[in-house]
Every structure is written in C-alpha cells, then in structure tokens.
Amino acid sequence: MNTNTYLSVNNLSKHFGDFTALKHISLDIKEGEFICFLGPSGCGKTTLLRAIAGLELPSEGQILQAQRDITLLPPEQRDFGIVFQSYALFPNLTVAENIAFGLTNQGMKKQEALEKVREWLELVDLPHSEHKFPAQLSGGQQQRVALARALALSPGLLLLDEPLSALDAKVRAHLRHEICQLQKKLGITTIMVTHDQEEALTMADRIVVMNHGVVEQIGTPREIYHHPASEFVADFIGAMNFFEAHHEQDGLLSINDYKFTHSNKISGQSVKVALRPEQIKVSAIQQTGIKARVVNSEFLGSFVRVECELENDKLIQVDLTSELLDELKLEPGSVCTLSWKSEDALIFEEQAA
Ligand code: ATP
C-alpha cells in the first residue's frame, strides 16, 4: 500500500447465492483522487460502491479507509457522503432542512447549521434557495442539493452513484464540470459509478474499468484510451475497429495481402488487430493496404466518419477530413485502400478459456 493511499480494497469478492458479482477485486485509491468505476450494466460497479459504503457486506476480502479496517462496519460508522441517481431528498423538508439534517443530528446548533447550509448553497451555485421544497427545483438543482447534503458533514470520502444519469444532456454536461471543480477545490477523495464512458473520460483522474465482476484495467483516461490492456477495454472505450490478422512470422502480420510489422510477442497463428478510426489512412486504390468499398459517410463537424466494407463484408470506420474526402472523391460505392502505421496497431491474442 502506498503512503498516500486513502482507500484500499483487497481481494474483495461478493456472492449473491451461486452468482459471483465481484471476483477478487483489489485497488488502491489515493487521497484526493477522483476515481470512476466504469463498465457495462451488471459488471458489479454498484455492488463495489455499496460494499465501500457498507450497504452490502462482502463475502471475502478487506476494505481499509484511512488505515482503518471498515470491511464489516455499518454505514453510520463509516466516513462518507453519498449521492444517488434518484435525488433522494426528503420531499417534505425545505432545501435548508435537507442539507442541515445531518448537521443538527450531530448536535450542531440550528443557527450554526443554517450558516453552514448557506455556505454550501453558495458552493453548489444555488444561493437563496434555502426555503424552497425539492419539488420546486429542477432535476439538476435537486442533485446540487443532494451534493451539498452529502458534503455538509465534511466526509473523508464522496461516493457518487450515477448522479448525472437522470438529467438531460445539457444539465449533465454543466454539472459534470461543476462537480469536478468542487471536488478539486475541496480535495475530497471521490468515487463515481458510471456506465457513461464520456463522463468517466472527462471527469476521472483514474478509471477502473470493470467487466463481469473483475477489474479489466485501472488507469488514467489517456492510458485507458491509448493503451487498453484487453480487447474488452479496447472495444468498450471509444470507437475501435477490429481486424482478424494472420501471424506470418516473428514481427510480421498480414491481413489478406497487406503485410505489416509489429513488436509484440505472439504465440498463436491468428490475432486481432485493433485500430481507432482516426488511425486508419484512406488512400487511392493503387496504394499498399487493404481494399475496401465506401458504404456511407457521416459529417461530424471537424471530421467525417466514413464506413467502409472489406472484401469479407466486415465494416470498418475511418475518420478523415472533409478536404481529403473531396480530394479522393469518396462516395458510396467508391473503392479505396486502408492502411496504418505499424506502431498504432494494438494486437490481442485469443485468451485461453
Ligand atoms: P448497472 O449499471 O446496471 O447498475 P452494475 O455494474 O452497477 O450495473 P451491479 O448492480 O453491481 O451492476 O450488479 C452486479 C450483478 O450482481 C448483476 O448481475 C446483478 O443482477 C447482481 N446483483 C446485484 N445485487 C444483487 C442482489 N441483491 N441479489 C442478487 N443479485 C444481485
């Protein structure tokens, strides 16, 4: 364990009857870090968050928070604030009463609690809202109140369980930015569960990518995007093309007649080669590469995403500028050649079952 590790999950598993939701999860979170648990539905991210909150007891393993073993402690004896997807505010209490609830419960005088409430409302950009009831606020505003309520007790750890997924796109983008700013300002260690990769890539210091109850990769957004550790991560994050390639000899792969070098140690005969749409070069038909036929193109502002079909009917996405599209006179039905820099190709071998 690192000296600045704030939360440490060691070999954690969780079984629900015969079903294993978490399998031997280990990870260390540094003080002040913003971590996202990211993965498809059912991968276990909420179960892991709930185990950290004490809302679910693990079947095995250990959780340490600030060097304290919290594995079996009830939630009220742990040091965290939590915000859920559904705002979970008390509907019959005003905004001020909602935020002050925990403070007065802890014995703080009403006046002092009200001052704290005002400070928090300023921080979450909702001044002068203390007398309103939750139903009088928008979804985004209610989530700000929920955030203020979670932070009012100055917890050591902030847990966010899909806090933005019930909000519309514009509010979500705005609140995303505000949560990040507030988190950095307070320096509070934060874990957010999300299935939205864009949210994770833009907000997290490090992302924990999960699949079927295991951690596939832990890394910064750039590491996860540029150096995915597995085929699953490569496929899950961002757009990715996969090609079946033949292992010709040490250092040489081929797809049809196109041969390219690589520096991986490969044991099998066939591998998957992964390339992002922006890493594939499109050129006129006579160049070296793989023959493809343009199926359609989508104008996306700063670039055009072209869908091409290979001879084996596989569809490949390629990003290029509008200028290049015009220069090559590419339109549905046009034949072209795809190629790439050898060093850009990610290579994945079939995993032994
Ligand atoms: P989502 O994004 O859909 O919420 P998730 O990654 O958060 O997915 P979890 O809620 O952690 O997934 O669930 C992981 C697996 O554990 C799922 O297959 C779920 O059905 C199962 N599971 C969760 N809670 C229970 C429970 N109380 N009893 C039985 N199975 C459960």
Image (cartoon, helix red, strand yellow):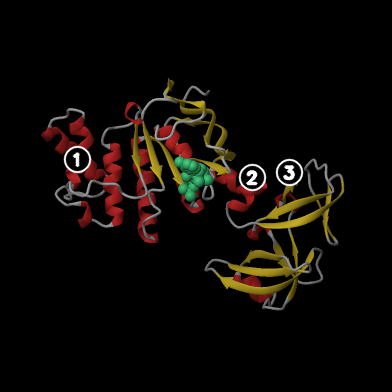
Q: Residue at x 79, y 72 (%)?
A: 285
Q: Position of residue 221 (x, y in %)?
A: 54, 45
- Amino acid under disc 1: Val
SS type, badge 2:
loop
Mark 1 is surrounded, within 10 Å at the Cα level, by few (under 14), some (14 to 19) or many (20 or more) other residues, namely many
Q: Which residue is mark 2?
A: 227
Q: Position of residue 244 (x, y in %)?
A: 77, 56
- Amino acid under disc 3: Gln
SS type, badge 1:
helix
User: In the rendered image, is residue 46 in sight?
Assistant: no
Q: Which residue is mark 1?
A: 117
Q: Position of residue 267 (x, y in %)?
A: 83, 42
SS type, badge 3:
loop
Q: Residue at x 19, y 47 (%)?
A: 95
Res 23 → quadrant: top right
**Which marked residue is nearer to the observer: mark 1 or mark 3?**
3
User: In the displayed structure, does residue 285 sit left or right of residue 208?
Assistant: right
Sequence order check, earlier mark of 1 and 3: 1
Sequence order check, earlier mark of 2 and 1: 1
Q: Residue at x 82, y 64 (%)?
A: 288
Q: Residue at x 20, y 31 (%)?
A: 105
Q: Which residue is mark 3?
A: 351
